[in-house]
Image: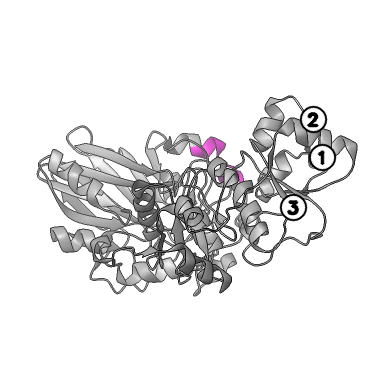
Amino acid sequence: MYFEQFYLGCLAHASYMIVSGAEAVVVDPQRDVESYLEAAKRHNATIRHVFETHLHADFVSGHRELAERTGAKIYIGPNGGATVPHVEVRDGFELCVGTVRIGVLETPGHTPESICLLVTDEEKSKEPWAVLTGDTLFVGDVGRPDLSKAYSASVLAGMLYDSLHRRLLTLPDNVIVYPGHGEGSLCGRKLGTAHSSTIRTERLTNYALQIKTREEFIQQLTINLPPCPQYFPQDAQINRSGAPALADLPKLQAIGAQQLKVLIEAGVIAIDVRPAEEFARRHVPGSINIPLSGQFASWAGTLVDLAASPVLIADTVEQLDEARTRLARIGLDEERGYLKDGVKGWEQAGFESTSLPQITVQDLHDCLKSRPRQVIDVRRGPEWQCVQVEGTTLYPLDRFKAALPELKLDEPVIVICKSGYRSSVACSMLKRAGYANVTNVIGGVDAWQAAGFAVTSEGVPA
């Protein structure tokens, strides 16, 4: 048996391939499927089977394209309403591929149709080797239960408790856990950094598995959930019927500086994908910065409507290609075009670029000592609860689309996050909204702590 995990850092998404004999199985594929086709070819195998552990909300799956290009069957659990041609699989279903046996465990909770896949390599042992848990069980966490229109979060949380305790926690301790996501995914709250674990480790260390009663589990799983990005239900719907192949998307068109100026004045979003430091040095007024260096697709989907038809701004063709692929992974397929020749083309057309002031954590430390400032921290709530810079106010970036923070337009605003990525995004959105005096903190809270400056935790020095 050959087994491979494909980890996509931009979406904190893990997919899998199993090869035995001349057949390959893909589990939870990302939208761009070439990596699976190439891996199968290297192992002289053909992809015959594609499993979805559930209908994903945080990314668009490549199941339909894989099936069309290879003739593979798609397998999906019950109660999901999938219309893409597929085999509905229930508890006890088994698929044998060479010496490998893949068994289905129905594990509703994250979604009604969620399944886990128990993998046994019978060439080595009759006992199960691993379980692919999708979004049911993560390293250090479990899936959020609030993504279904058909069931309330409380009902799904109850299902999730039952699935964990009646299905997964009955497995042997040494079974390896391969989840569908890692740290940074919005499908959970406290995901760990590791990309795999064991049943024993999760039994002992996963906070959600330490909760003693079903009632308390439901209560804890349904409070203080992070906001659900607007693109989640849209992606789940796309995955029900299957997305078109990436090759079918129209070619991205060049847009001149004068046309872009008109579009921005009309409210069209221009996304500058360059690094934060390049954006800070010079950028098109009114553009927002979502750098490719971080979780670009997740933040684009959180802050921009899938039907927004944004214009992309980049320095290179490679940046444009990468941005378009990543946006397609979350279903943002209809970009309006890209700025011809980037910021350089904007300036050559006679338009002025603008800059974003940046300060070091030493500068921030001195500012906070001299007098109170409008300093907002755009990290998520749990991050804020663990570590805070005294004198800052929490306003998570994922709230910006619904409403910007209430700040005084005529006073300077300083923005901080963990490392400087999210704060650059937030600064660009504030500038676009008319806040002229906005400053980004280089290095964020990480740099603040590295410099030895004091922090607090829940209001108590840490």
**Location of residue 238 by image quarter:** bottom left
Cα separation, mark 3 vs mark 1, equals 22 Å
Mark 3 vs 2, N-terminal side: 3
Mark 3 or 2: in front is 3
Tell me which secondary structure the magenta stretch mostly adopts: helix
How crowded pointer 2 is (Cα within 10 Å; few <14, some 14-19, many 20+) is rated as some
Where residue 345 sits: x, y (%)?
Answer: 45, 54
x 66%, y 57%: residue: 431
**Residue 199 rendering spot, x and y as whole percentages:** 44, 39
The residue labelled by disc 3 is 437
Identify the residue at horizontal 54%, vertical 57% (top origin). Answer: 144
Q: Is residue 116 in sight in this rendering?
A: no
Q: Is residue 269 visible?
A: yes
Task: Name the kind of residue labelled 2 in the image.
Answer: Ala
Residue wearing tag 2? 454
Residue 330 is labelled as none
Circle nearer the N terminus (3, 1): 1
Q: Nearer the viewer, mark 3 or mark 1?
A: 3
Q: Residue at x 43, y 45 (%)?
A: 170
Query: Residue 65, position in %: x, y?
Result: 23, 62
Residue that carries the numbered disc 1 in the rendered image: 390
